[in-house]
Amino acid sequence: METKIVTAKLRNFRMSPQKVRELADIVRGKKAGDAKNILEFTPRKSAMALKKLLDSAIANAENNFNMDPDNLFIKTIMVDEGQVMKRFVPRAQGRAAKILKRSSHITIELAENTKD
């Protein structure tokens, strides 16, 4: 039997991938409801974005594929590097220092747990 995989993507999220990956590693492989609770009570900017993306993926599964939201789990969650905005700050003796404003592309894939 082929399992359905539901995907949701968030592109150009203005936070470095390193910071987002810390939270993504915590929820990877967890049931969707448990991951939602973890993200809701984590005081980080990335938690709010990941929770919103997880809600979107759950809604996609429920409405487009008629999957039961209680049986969903996070199969994969990937945080890739997005666009990098380059800015410069003046320094001493006429020099300039580079500032890299990084962004992230986040992809969540949900699958249905069929072990029941």
Image: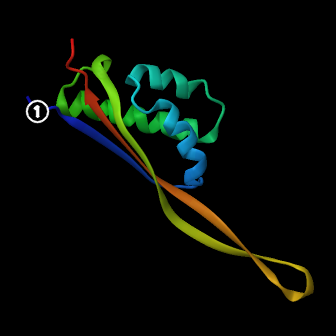
Amino acid, disc 1: Glu
Which residue is the extreme one toward the bottom? 94
Apparent side of residue 34 relative to residue 112 in the rendered image (left or right): right
Residue holding disc 1 = 2
Q: Position of residue 109 (x, y in %)?
A: 32, 39
Between 60 and 31, the one lying in front of the other is 31
Which residue is the extreme one toward the left? 1
User: How many numbered callouts?
Assistant: 1
Apparent side of residue 96 relative to residue 33 in the rendered image (left or right): right
State the quadrant of the N terminus: top left
At 51% from the left and 66% from the top, the residue drawn is 83
Vertical comparison of 113 with 64: above or below: above
Dividing the picture into quadrants, the one containing residue 99 is bottom right
Dividing the picture into quadrants, the one containing residue 31 is top left
Between 12 and 100, the one lying in front of the other is 100
At 59% from the left and 54% from the top, the residue drawn is 16
